[in-house]
Image (cartoon, rainbow, N blue to C red):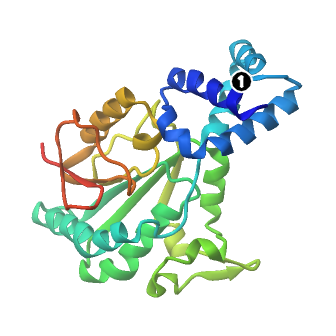
Amino acid sequence: MRRADCVAFLRHLLPRLGLCWAGYRRVHRTVCKRLARRLRELGLADPAGYARRLDEDPGERERLEAMLRIPISRFWRDASVWEWLGEIGLPGLAQAARASGRNRLSAWSCGCAAGEEPYGLALLWHRRLAPRFPGTALDILATDADPVLLARAREARYAPSSLRALPADLRRGFLEEEGRPRLPPAIRAAVRFRRQDVRAAMPEGPFDLLLCRNLVFTYFAQDLRCEMAARFRRRLRVGGLMVLGAKERLPDRVEGFVPVTAGLPVYRRRS
């Protein structure tokens, strides 16, 4: 399949799925390789034949959705965001919870891929913050649409390269199993995983912290981004934090959020 044909196919197809070409522009070569491989498996000559297959076979839609996922994940991705969470964001949420008489914080990692993000949050809390806030617990729910990635997340076993950016104090305690680092049982138990496509369903909350990075506000179409932002807002407590990817921003017409700090993609629910 020629790349030009694949690009034309994606430009036509993505809006029908609530996705946008702008988000896929930088990663379209990866998607095109997957599509070309799938066309060879099906014995199809061109994207037009695959489009007909999608219309005729509802099960192929799920295969296509899997090919369109771009799970780029590692521990401590966007280190400045994590440092801010550890120094300011999470302590502020813990203090607010205590002031309102609550002894639990609730966090949701949306689009958690292989689990590095929610486990990174668990490491940060248990190693650095739990001693400062005795009696306060952090509940972490992590969701993703991909069952293969969720199975890897539950295993909690990672390549050494995935840990490279983790600060030394958070790397300590990993177990060595089958030649690869694995998180200890206490950290694994701190995260609950659930298969869920955020377009179809969301956990009810309310959450103090929502991490939705490099998914909705990169790959979804603009109208769907606004709809998702409104639904996220309803699941955050007033004063709760929503963290996006380093290059993501909320659409201008989204209401109810204010940026927390210049230069970081962190928003607070104000009402």
Between 222 and 146, the residue placed more toward the observer is: 222
Mark 1 Cα-neighbour bin, 10 Å: few <14, some 14–19, many ≥20: few
Between 80 and 11, the residue placed more toward the observer is: 11
Extreme residue toward the right, this view: 43
Residue 135 at x, y percent in the picture: 26, 75
- Kind of residue indicated by mark 1: Gly
Residue at figure coordinates x 67%, y 38% from the top left: 67
Quarter containing the C terminus = top left
Asked whether the viewer can see residue 255, the reply is: yes
Between 266 and 174, the residue placed more toward the observer is: 266
Vertical position of residue 50 compared to residue 212: above or below: above
Quarter containing the N terminus = top right
Residue 23 at x, y percent in the picture: 49, 40
Q: Quadrant of residue 158?
A: bottom right
Between 114 and 126, the residue placed more toward the observer is: 114
Vertical position of residue 137 compared to residue 37: above or below: below
Residue 71 appears left or right of 170: right
Q: Quadrant of residue 151?
A: bottom right
Residue 89 appears left or right of 39: left
Asked whether the viewer can see residue 184, the reply is: no
Residue 117 at x, y percent in the picture: 47, 62
Residue underneath mark 1: 59
User: How many marks overall?
Assistant: 1
Residue 218 at x, y percent in the picture: 44, 43
Q: Quadrant of residue 185?
A: bottom right
Mark 1 lies on a secondary structure that is helix
Residue at figure coordinates x 38%, y 29% from the top left: 224
Residue at figure coordinates x 25%, y 82% from the top left: 132
